[in-house]
Image (tube, rainbow, N blue to C red):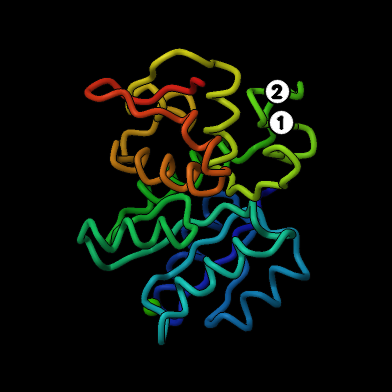
C-alpha cells in the first residue's frame, strides 16, 4: 500500500510541484495550506509522513510541529521540515520544534525522495519486539510505550529508535556516524550534528537522573551506561 504523505505548504505552486513529484514516486498525497486544514486531514486519514513548510504565515510551521508532537495520537508521526533558510540555528530550531529531518529549498526531487524513504524506513515498526529494560527505563517496541519508573515518557520516532538502539546495545560507545548508520539508516544527506540534537531531545524527555545514562564520550560519541 502506498504511504500517505501530507504536504503542508501555503504556496500553491510549490505544493503542486511536491504533489507531482510524490505521485510520480508512487505515494498517495494530501495537501493543506494552513494549520487548520492540516490538523483536519491528519485526524481523518492515516497519514504516514508530513512535509511541513517552515515558511507558513506567522510561525505556523513550528506551531504545527509542536502541536503534533504534543498529541498522543500524532506524537510519532514523522515530519520533514522544508526550509528556505540554510542557517544552522534555523535547522536546529526546526528539529527542536519536533521535526525529524529538514531539507533546504531549493532541493532536487531525488534528494527529497531519499529523505522521505529514509525517514519512513526508520519510523517503520522495529522487527525486534521484545521489551527492553535498562535501569528504571522500560521500553516496549510492540506498543511503542516508554516508562521511566512510573512516568510515561513521550518520544518522537527518532528518539524512540535511538533509545531502543542504546538499550539493546548498552555500555558501548558509538560515534555519530555509526549512530546515523544504525538508527537513521545509511543516508548521505544527514549531518552528524543532527545526532546531537536528537540526543539532547532524548535526554530532555527522560527523568533528570535517568538522562545521565545517555553519556557523551568526548571525541568518541555516545554511550548508554549507568
Ligand atoms: Ca511557504
Residue in the picture at 58% in, 44% down: 157
Identify the residue under disc 1: 138
Q: Residues within 10 Å of mark 1 (few under 14, many from 20)?
A: many
Q: Percent from the top left, x then y, of residue 199?
A: 43, 39
Q: Quadrant of ligand 1?
A: bottom left
Q: Is residue 113 above or below residue 138?
A: below
Q: Is residue 48 above or below residue 64?
A: above
Q: Are marks 1 and 2 in contact (CB under 8 Å)?
A: yes
Say the numbered circle drawn on residue 5: none
Q: Is residue 6 above or below residue 118?
A: below
Q: Quadrant of residue 83?
A: bottom left
Q: Percent from the top left, x then y, of residue 81?
A: 42, 61
Residue in the picture at 63% in, 81% down: 37
Q: Secondary structure at mark 2?
A: strand
Q: Nearer the viewer, residue 6 or 223?
A: 223
Q: Which residue is the extreme one toward the bottom? A: 57
Q: Is residue 197 above or below residue 161?
A: below
Residue in the picture at 76% in, 21% down: 130
Residue in the picture at 32% in, 40% down: 189
Q: Secondary structure at mark 1?
A: strand
Identify the residue under disc 2: 132
Amino acid at each position: 500500500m502506498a504511504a500517505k504523505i501530507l504536504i503542508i505548504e501555503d504556496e500553491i505552486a510549490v505544493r503542486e510541484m511536491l504533489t507531482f513529484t510524490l505521485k510520480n514516486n508512487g505515494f498517495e498525497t494530501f495537501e493543506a495550506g494552513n494549520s487548520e486544514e492540516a490538523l483536519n486531514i491528519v485526524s481523518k486519514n492515516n497519514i504516514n509522513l508530513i512535509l511541513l513548510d517552515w515558511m507558513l504565515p506567522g510561525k505556523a510551521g513550528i506551531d504545527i510541529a509542536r502541536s503534533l508532537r504534543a498529541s498522543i495520537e500524532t506524537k510519532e508521526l514523522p515530519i520533514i521540515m522544508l526550509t528556505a533558510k540554510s542557517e544552522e540555528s534555523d535547522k536546529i530550531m526546526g528539529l527542536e520544534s519536533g521535526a525529524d529531518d529538514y531539507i533546504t529549498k531549493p532541493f532536487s526531487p531525488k534528494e527529497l525522495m531519499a529523505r522521505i524513504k529514509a525517514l519512513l524506513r526508520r519510523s517503520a515498526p522495529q522487527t525486534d519486539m521484545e521489551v527492553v529494560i535498562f535501569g528504571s527505563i522500560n521500553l516496549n517496541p510492540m506498543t511503542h510505550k516508554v516508562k521511566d519508573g512510573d512516568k510515561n515518557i513521550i518520544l518522537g520516532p527518532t528518539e524512540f529508535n535511538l533509545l531502543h538502539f542504546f538499550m539493546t546495545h548498552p555500555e558501548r560507545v558509538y560515534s555519530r556516524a555509526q549512530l546515523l548508520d544504525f538508527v537513521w539508516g545509511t543516508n548521505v544527506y544527514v549531518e552528524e550534528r543532527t545526532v546531537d540534537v536528537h540526543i539532547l531531545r532524548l535526554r530532555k524527555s527522560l527523568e533528570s537522573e535517568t538522562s545521565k545514562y545517555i553519556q557523551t564520550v568526548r571525541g568518541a560519541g555516545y554511550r548508554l551506561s549507568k
